[in-house]
Amino acid sequence: MTLKIGVIGTGAIGREHIKRITNTLAGGKIVAVTDVNQDAAKTAVEQFGLDAVVHPDDKALVADHNVDAVLVTSWGPAHEQSVLAAIEAGKYVFCEKPLATTAEGCMRIVEAEIKQGKRLVQVGFMRRYDSGYVQLKQAIDSHYIGEPLMIRCAHRNPTVDQNYTTDMAITDTLIHEIDVLHWLINDDYKSVQVVFPKKTILASAHLQDPQIVMMETNSGIIIHVEVFVNCQYGYDIQCEVIGEEGIVHLPEVASIITRKEAKLGTNILMDWKQRFIDAYDKELQDFMDSIKQKGEPNGPTAWDGYIAAVTADACVKAQQTGEKEAVTLVEKPNFYRNEKAQIV
Ligand code: NAI
Ligand code: ISE
């Protein structure tokens, strides 16, 4: 059976996902697209030679009887409305991060999904599918390094555009660490704090860059994440987990090592699209396969989207106050308790 997919938002990652579903992955077909910029939607249809209807908006796309599952790859503020419409129609929905821009919005999605009585939503936290993070998780879960005590991470982008603001370092960028780290150590966050080191002259006037985010988990693990989005030299993701009996480090991206002109060198990627390319493939393949095999998606849940939003809100508050801010989650609904920590 082919899963017939409608895509809401044909920008950068929307087109990447259309391309992989059409050219690389098995079992899915893009049958409908929409974008507030209708020319962008039409261009995507032409660019990838799709046999797909261009709908005027998300509501029309969700209502299309030919669409089994919806891919939400529009701007963050538009996600909630499209995800709620898909749930209301009983359709599966894969939503790029953030699930919604507020914790309240994520909670509305959680409640709507619970009301439908089955899992319909998967959030695009693709790092859980990255083989490096999966290996870290296996090492932690098997107690290879004993109990984790501290984690040190870096999330570096070469540059960002003028529209990128100080809070986006949290809501757009750190949000990946917020998700993958609590999954990695199977623990929730208790408090967060943000400090601003000396600012790089290469960031726009309104952007505080770099930033250091400190997070403490319920069991007392202390996490430091450096977010540096104008680092110039590459797209660089680092993660080191320090345990009682050893340390595990995220592997570097495989690349040839050169010896030339008295230098030893290896390449660093510049583009996020390349860094997690396998993980994007795997998350969408898993979305399609698990719907076909179990009748529900397997990956990060709407509850994970809620945890990320609550933690991001606390971090944004901490940016403003300079203080340690509490992360306060409501009690996890039973609906989300049975899920297994998924490893692919
Ligand atoms: P983009 O700006 O390139 O594309 C967004 C598209 O959505 C635009 O074509 C825009 O016209 C359209 N759009 C906006 N509101 C809409 C609405 N109400 N209905 C239909 N279309 C609408 O942005 P990009 O980089 O593709 O990001 C899209 C989403 O994907 C964001 O939420 C972003 O955070 C997320 N993202 C996730 C990444 C990951 O690593 N998982 C990487 C990059 C983006
Ligand atoms: C972007 O939206 C992403 O999601 C990338 O994965 C992240 O590294 C980047 O900082 C964000 O702007």
Image: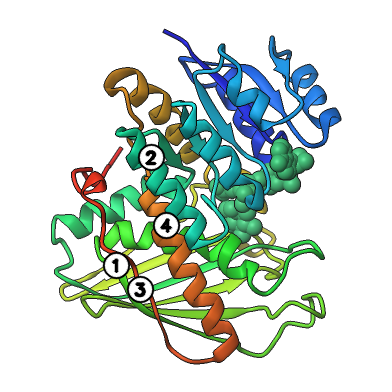
> Residue at label 4?
306
Between the C-alphas of marks 1 and 3, the distance is: 10 Å
Q: Earlier in the sequence, mark 1 or mark 2?
A: 2
Looking at marks 2 and 3 on the same chain, the residue that comes earlier in the sequence is marked by: 2
Q: Is residue 58 left or right of residue 69?
A: right
Which x, y percent locates residue 257?
54, 52
Q: Nearer the viewer, mark 1 or mark 3?
A: 3
Nearer mark to the viewer, of 2 and 4: 2
- Quadrant of res 96: top right
* Mark 1, other Cα within 10 Å: few <14 / some 14–19 / many ≥20: many
Alpha carbon separation for disc pair 2 and 3:
22 Å
Q: Which residue is mark 1?
A: 188
| Residue 237 image offset from top left, x and y in percent | 51, 61
> Which amino acid type is marked by label 2?
Glu
Residue at the disc numbered 2: 113
Q: Is residue 196 above or below residue 162?
A: below
- 10 Å crowding of disc 3: few (<14), some (14-19), many (20+): some
Q: Secondary structure at mark 4?
A: helix
The kind of residue on which mark 4 rests is Tyr
Query: Residue 200's mark?
Result: none
Ligand 1 within 8 Å of the CB at mark 4: no
**Residue drawn at the location 69% of the way across and 24% of the way down:** 33
Which of the two discs, 4 and 1, sits closer to the camera?
4
The crowding category of the residue bearing disc 2, from other C-alpha atoms within 10 Å (few below 14, some 14 to 19, many at least 20), is many
